[in-house]
Image: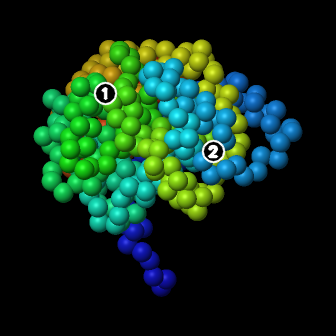
């Protein structure tokens, strides 16, 4: 038998397993409403697709420089001026092969094997699994509902090398206001803890705008993506913003680990950054879907959840129905034709009693899902 590395002994990404199970049901001819994957139901903006078509007709689309197309980095920097009033040097922007590559670069640049990095639970499962694959130790913080499932300075244990915070968060959709985010960044600075801010759901919020960590401190790593607000999941493109004195170290890592981000996706992303009207129309669909679910999930048998501030998820407490969210998710798929994600993906302990519903698809699908869930629950 070929020997293996223990770094490969990471948990499955359960939502992808649910997606595959849903695909199998569809292959058998069943209708499935997809509420499992955090994927917009809309394509990349029209301008992005048209820009790529033009480039494919005239450009070999070979390697770019490791940090990404200079014009794309400059346009991303301008986004920070437009959204947050920040004068960001484009040299600090690192274009990545999706936010996943951004996390790999951030963790590899900031942490050594054995370092302890805190993440809130519930939280995005790939944080802890990427860390484990890199021999970095994830430290789960059992975030409380009264704290909107976000970490607080009082919950940070001793001995941390890093803290990763997401706002809006996956799976809860909760957001940190400027004071709460500032308190975490200030505590991290005082204790010599590297701060990583996951901002991939910025642009998708339903009240006040999301606050960037860069509004508070320059000495942080910010991860963002074209997958969510820009509706480009399969294009696998994201970006990092890093401190000025970290650019070269991240560049060296990017050169060796990834060579460069996908050229075709960079061309499309540059055009997508100017597709504001289309992208804001997508957000209005998410807003309408959110309102449908907030009003209807209780009738459908899932009354216990906190309405999300941003992103496109509802994280429901199903403890009155089960202590095995995986079994419940299987029943919903097989009996109701609705795919949802077990909370175990996001919280290895308390996730047995929670489900995540994504409402990133068409409004008609969300309405049909509610009808099916209500019929299934006898509501």
Tell me the residue that label 2 is attached to: 68
Mark 1 surroundings within 10 Å by alpha-carbon count, few (fewer than 14), some (14 through 19), many (20 or more): many
Q: Tally the numbered discs.
A: 2
Q: Nearer the viewer, mark 2 or mark 1?
A: 2
Tell me the residue that label 1 is attached to: 175
Mark pair 2, 1: CA separation: 30 Å
Residue 80 appears in the rendering: yes
Mark 2 surroundings within 10 Å by alpha-carbon count, few (fewer than 14), some (14 through 19), many (20 or more): many
The residue most toward the right is 58
* Rendered image quadrant of residue 123: top left
Q: Which residue is drawn at 44% across and 14% down?
A: 288
x then y, percent, for residue 99: 49, 44
The residue most toward the front is 245
Image check: 126 left or right of 186? right
Residue placed most toward the observer, 74 or 261: 74
SS type, badge 2: loop
Q: Residue at x 47, y 40 (%)?
A: 241
x then y, percent, for residue 329: 35, 41
SS type, badge 1: loop
Reading the chain from its start, which is encountered first: label 2 or label 1? 2
Q: Which residue is drawn at 45% across and 49% down?
A: 245
Residue 373 appears in the rendering: no
What is the image's colouring? rainbow
Question: Is there a contact, CB below 8 Å, between mark 2 and mark 1?
Answer: no
Q: In which quarter of the image is the C terminus?
A: top left
The residue most toward the left is 154
x then y, percent, for residue 73: 60, 37
- In this view, 128 is above or below 59: below
- In this view, 243 is above or below 205: below
Q: Which residue is drawn at 37% across and 50% down?
A: 127
x then y, percent, for residue 358: 42, 31
Residue placed most toward the observer, 171 or 199: 199
């Amino acid at each position: 038998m070929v020997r293996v590395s223990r770094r490969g002994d990471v948990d499955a990404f359960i939502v992808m397993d649910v997606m595959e199970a849903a695909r199998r049901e569809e292959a058998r001819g069943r209708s499935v409403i997809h509420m499992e994957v955090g994927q917009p139901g809309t394509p990349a903006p029209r301008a992005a697709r048209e820009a790529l078509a033009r480039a494919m007709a005239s450009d070999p689309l070979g390697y770019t420089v490791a940090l990404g197309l200079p014009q794309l980095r400059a346009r991303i920097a301008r986004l920070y001026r437009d959204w947050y009033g920040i004068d960001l040097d484009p040299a600090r922007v690192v274009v990545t092969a999706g936010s996943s590559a951004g996390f790999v670069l951030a963790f590899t640049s900031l942490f050594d094997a054995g370092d302890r990095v805190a993440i809130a639970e519930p939280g995005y499962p790939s944080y802890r699994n990427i860390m484990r694959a890199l021999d970095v130790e994830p430290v789960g913080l059992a975030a409380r509902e009264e704290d909107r499932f976000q970490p607080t300075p009082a919950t940070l244990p001793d001995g941390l090398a890093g803290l990763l915070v997401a706002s809006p968060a996956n799976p809860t959709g909760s957001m940190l206001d400027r004071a709460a985010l500032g308190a975490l960044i200030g505590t991290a600075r005082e204790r010599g803890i590297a701060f990583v801010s996951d901002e991939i759901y910025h642009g998708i919020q339903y009240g006040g705008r999301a606050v960037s960590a860069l509004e508070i401190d320059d000495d942080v790593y910010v991860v963002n993506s074209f997958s969510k607000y820009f509706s480009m999941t399969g294009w696998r493109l994201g970006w990092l913003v890093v401190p000025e004195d970290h650019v070269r170290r991240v560049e060296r890592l990017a050169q060796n680990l990834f060579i460069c981000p996908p050229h075709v996706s960079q061309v499309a992303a540059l055009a997508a950054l100017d597709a504001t009207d289309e992208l804001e129309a997508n957000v209005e669909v998410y807003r309408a879907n959110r309102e449908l679910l907030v009003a209807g999930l209780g009738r459908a048998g899932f009354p216990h959840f906190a309405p999300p501030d941003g992103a496109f998820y509802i994280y429901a407490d199903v403890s009155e129905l089960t202590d095995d969210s995986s079994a419940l998710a299987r029943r919903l798929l097989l009996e109701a034709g609705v795919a949802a994600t077990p909370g175990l993906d996001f919280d290895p302990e308390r996730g047995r009693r929670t489900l995540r519903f994504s409402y990133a698809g068409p409004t008609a699908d969300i309405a049909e899902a509610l009808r099916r869930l209500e019929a299934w629950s006898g509501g």
